Amino acid sequence: MNNSLLVVVLASGIAYGTPLLYASLGELLAERSGVLNLGVEGMMLVGAVLGFWTVQRLHATTWLSLAAAIGVAALAGTAMATIHAFLVITLRASQIVSGLALTIFAGAAGLSSYLGNDLNLADNPARHAFHAVFPASVQRWSVVGPVIFGQDVLVYASWACVVGVSLYLSRTRPGLNVRAVGEAPASADAMGINVTAYRYAHTLAGGAFAGVAGATFTLAITPQWVSGITGGAGWIAIALVIFAFWRPALCLVGAYFFGALQALSPQLQARGIHLGPTELWTNSLPYVMTVLVLVFVSASGARRRLGAPASLGLPYVREER
Amino acid sequence: MRIERRLRQPRWLLFAVPAGSLVFAFFASGLVLLATGHDAVSSYRQIVDAAFLNSGAVGQTLTQATPLAFTGLAAAAAFRMRLFNIGAEGQLFMGAIAADAAGLYLGGAGWPTPLVIFAMIVAGCAGGAAWALIPGALRAFFKTNEIITSLMLNYVAAYILTYLVFNTESYWRQTTGFNASVFPTAKTLPDRALWPGAVIHVRGGVALPLGAGLAVLVAILLWFLYTRTRFGFEAQVLGDSPRAARYAGMRTRRKILAVMGISGAVAGLGGASQVGDFSHMLDADPNGLQRQYYGYTGIVVAALARYNPLAVVPVAVLIGALQNAGNTLQGADFPSGLVGVMQGIILFSALGGELLVRYRVRVGRALPAVEAA
């Protein structure tokens, strides 16, 4: 039962989907405040490399070193996001160009690879990594064993993050303010909300999430450092935010769906099942579906309810409103 | 301190800001090198040697610069109308696929070389334009945000490219011979379909690829189109103020489709040149994610050139030189990843410098005087 295709794909889909979930939650926060950050891939890679470095550097192999690594990864992602925030919020630069520049600066041919080489990280496996929390006996339970109880702590923490972000955006004063800033910054400003501060805070928070997402790769999924280890997950995370209509709970559904697609192709191959050009459609389906969702949202009457934050991508300049 | 919009942008600033950004970027990257215990001066010397001075270096720089010039021009063409086509990457792949098919088929059928090359150029443009018209049409008819759709289609195109070479016995794949049975490879173009290059006899001979010449030609054409024709004027107005353009009776939809088509065609031509000039086959990455990032770097090139087609070409050579140095110097004692860091810092400073072009930073109290427009 636990070896059936569905269970295996679900279980590894959740594992593969977790970095997507973290990164997309972060991107969602930034976008809800009106800042599009296309630098997710770059922020993830820097978080991945520095999180990994922390574990290698600390001699303790307890959960403390892992916690420190996650902290460092979050900080690294935040630092990267600060560059973007400064350029697009304070200096009013183009969000698209700045985000792409961030990916080039930090990405597979940039800072992350520079750091990885300089700190000599490529040759050794991680000294310590995240493992499944529950004992093996529980993991043998049918279906829920591998799918629910076979995961590491980062997976469970991501569920808490989904609930947290969701409640934050819908039930708290600052959360409602962010949405106001993203939809109508001029009105928010008139209400006395500090647009600049909100945009900075949420872009930086987005960076922290992206950093953690990166560390998920190097400390849980494949505990090692390889240049470009995220393999395009940052772009899928950007797609995911749209796919989820800018809603945290749907990010979770989408992340596991996209994660499962990623897990599906090797599983089908291993089992000798041929469903047409498997790799082509499992790989490109997330992108195609995102395009379709975007078309649906923009063409239908649901645009205002389900669409992007109205001021996404636009700088806010008080004198020019 | 206050930031005010400039009513007039002084011409000298348009040159001073990019130049200043470059200087600043070299200093900042130097600091990164020093901070991590490298010798900045020797690293820079290595870069200059590998990019321009070593024998054959200029040729390799041009090899890197040519696709960047095309993707940069593609971005400039669209961004000038505020159509954010960030799909040059995918459009380049689609152009390469179409041009490769044309070269394989017509070259194999024994057509004369000039006709084969012409057909490859047309096919490349058509492939790129078709791929760009998907986000273009979605934008024109459903108002779908072209930024994200063009971005997503990059990956679809990259996976299609990989699929054609690795996962299927397609027309593009080499299916006979010993090598093909060991590792999947793409078919090599027949001799008739190879693009000629002019050789200049300096520094041991520099090969000027045909694509580089085409890129210069396209740059001039685009410059003419955007500054000297009604079409360019209307595109500019539509970009600056869609509402004013509507009132003036300009056809928004048609223009969106036309500009996206042109942008995609230029990127697709880059793909054709990639196949005809350099790789002579479909060059795919087995992991599906094509690693060169020509499309994204092209946007960076266009932004540095302030979306001026004529400036795109020299900027592409500069960034191509960096790229070339990064490829050549990999390993050894040269810090890998430095090139990306430098490109990033150059861009960041250029983006920051943009502020100085558009706004003036005043220290002190606001002046009541109003500047004449």
Image: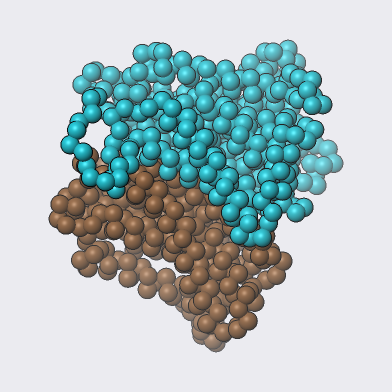
Residue B176 sits in quarter: top right
The residue depicted at 22 percent of the width and 60 percent of the height is A177
Q: Residue furthest left?
A: A191
Q: In front: B129, or A40?
A: A40
At x 43% / y 40%, what residue is drawn?
B353
Is residue A253 among the parts visible in the rendering? no
Quarter of image, res A33: bottom left
Q: x, y percentage for residue B297?
A: 55, 39
Pick whichever, B167 or A37, lies toward us.
A37
Of B94 and B52, which appears nearest the observer?
B52
Residue B358 horizontal/vertical position (percent): 35, 35
Residue at the far right in the pictured view: B178
- Residue B13 placed where, x, y %? 42, 31
Residue visible at 66% across and 60% down? B37
What quarter of the picture does the N terminus of chain A occupy?
bottom right
Residue A75 to residue B326: above or below: below
Chain seen in cyan: B
Whether residue B197 appears in this view of the structure is: yes
Give the side of residue A49 with respect to residue B299, left or right: right
Q: Is residue B265 left or right of residue B226?
A: right
Q: Give the number of marks.
A: 0
- Image chain in brown: A
Please give the name of the residue rendered at 49% of the width and 35% of the height, measured from the top-left corner: B18
Q: Is B328 positioned to the left or the right of A202 in the image? A: right
Asked if B225 appears above or below A245 in the picture, the reply is above
Q: Quadrant of the C terminus of chain A?
A: top left
- Residue B127 position (above or below residue B353): above
